[in-house]
Amino acid sequence: MTPKQAIALVKSYAGDPNITIESCKNYGMDYLITAYKDPTEMDPFYLVNKFNSSVRKYTIAENPARYYNTPEVQIR
């Protein structure tokens, strides 16, 4: 799965094709995508499994150091 495919899954999961995509990170078996409808949203994070295409909400509070130490992938 490519980052673009993961983003398309997040848009479908969120039910909003115009959701703002802030970033995409390579999170091992997942992509961590920051996407929000409202910039004040507290946890605008989604994990997309690269192998089975499952999407779930996520909070970076589970492991903030991992989030801040993982570089973004190119999505354009």
Image (cartoon, rainbow, N blue to C red):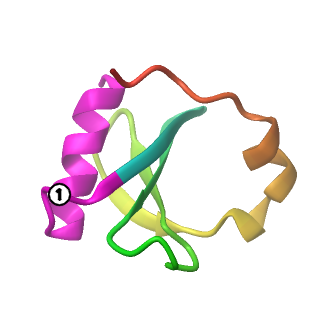
Horizontal side of 66 relative to 12 (left or right) equals right
The amino acid sitting under disc 1 is: Asn
- Please state the horizontal and vertical placement of residue 45, each as a whole percent of the image: 50, 62
Q: Residues within 10 Å of mark 1 (few under 14, many from 20)?
A: few
Q: Which residues are magenta?
A: 1-20
Horizontal side of 63 relative to 15 (left or right) equals right
Horizontal side of 62 relative to 57 (left or right) equals right
- Please state the horizontal and vertical placement of residue 56, each as a whole percent of the image: 40, 64
- Which residue occupies 52% across, 23% down? 73
Residue 68, quarter of the rendered image: top right
Hey, which residue is sitting farthest front in the picture? 39
Mark 1 element type: loop
In this rendering, is residue 74 above or below 23?
above
The number of discs equals 1
* Nearer the observer, 19 or 15: 19
- Which residue occupies 21% across, 63% down? 13
Q: Is residue 45 magenta?
A: no
- Please state the horizontal and vertical placement of residue 42, each as a whole percent of the image: 58, 79
Location of mark 1 (residue): 18
Figure quadrant of the N terminus: top left
In this rendering, is residue 58 above or below 71?
below
- Which residue occupies 75% across, 66% down? 62
Our reading of the magenta stretch's main secondary structure is: helix
Residue 50, quarter of the rendered image: top left
In this rendering, is residue 42 above or below 68?
below
- Which residue occupies 39% across, 75% down? 38
Figure quadrant of the C terminus: top left
